[in-house]
Image: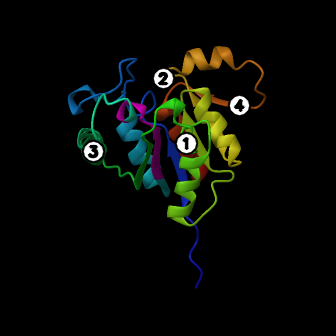
Amino acid sequence: MSMEPPRLVVLDRDGVINRDSPDYIRSPAQWIPLPGAPEAIARLGQAGYTVVVASNQSGLGRGLFDRATLEAIHDRMNAVIEAAGGKLAGIFYCPHRPEAGCDCRKPLPGLLLQIEAAFGCRLSGQPVVGDSERDLRAAQAVNARPILVRSGNGRRTEAQLQGWRHLEVYDDLAAVADALCGAAT
């Protein structure tokens, strides 16, 4: 019996699941979920999607917080999502500064390739949701389905992306979940 590959949805963290900050999210107390986002993740899971986070976290490389603090932030995120009935299957992040020259910092596809390896499937055609052009470029690089949300930096990103044809844009993660779960039934 062959296992069906998982249907993945990859989410950026800051600006998609939680409020973003130009000064970085540096503590669990600063991690504040966006309205409806934890419930949206729960709905995606109930519709059969495996939900994964891919996030640039250069604050780690900049020394603004340590790995233990980042794990505490993610523990809080997981607890809030689980309280809403949802579950994240994984959290993948790039800890490097922009100038480090790594291949995992979005817009490069390294994080998404890590997700493909971890879940044993391709992201081709799978939704990748973000609020910045780097999220969309990383999605394009693995032939995924880029989706822009207007939360976080999304409105500014949308204004800058006039040249993109056929870009899916939604107000927030709840609207993405509505669209994907409607399509999933």
Image position of 19 (left or right of 129)? left
| Mark 3 → mark 4, Cα distance in angstroms | 33 Å
Indicate the amino acid at tag 2: Ser
Task: Rate crowding at label 4 as few (under 14), some (14 to 19) or many (20 or more) other CA atoms within 10 Å.
Answer: some
Q: Are marks 4 and 1 in contact (CB under 8 Å)?
A: no
Image position of 66 (left or right of 21)? left
Image position of 91 (left or right of 11)? left
| Mark 2 → mark 4, Cα distance in angstroms | 16 Å
Residue underneath mark 2:
151
**Disc on the earlier residue, 4 or 1:** 1
Q: x, y (%) of residue 88?
A: 38, 51
| Mark 4 → mark 1, Cα distance in angstroms | 27 Å
Element type where label 3 sits in the image: helix
Task: State which quadrant residue 59 falls in.
Answer: top left
Indicate the amino acid at tag 4: Leu
Residue underneath mark 3:
71
Q: x, y (%) of residue 185?
A: 57, 54
Task: State which quadrant residue 155 falls in.
Answer: top right
**Disc on the earlier residue, 3 or 1:** 3
In the figure, 64 relative to 123: above or below?
Answer: above
Residue for point 67% across, 47% down: 144
Element type where label 1 sits in the image: loop
The mark lying in front, picked from 4 and 1, is 1
Indicate the amino acid at tag 1: Cys
Element type where label 2 sits in the image: loop
Residue for point 27% across, 45% down: 71
Residue underneath mark 4:
167
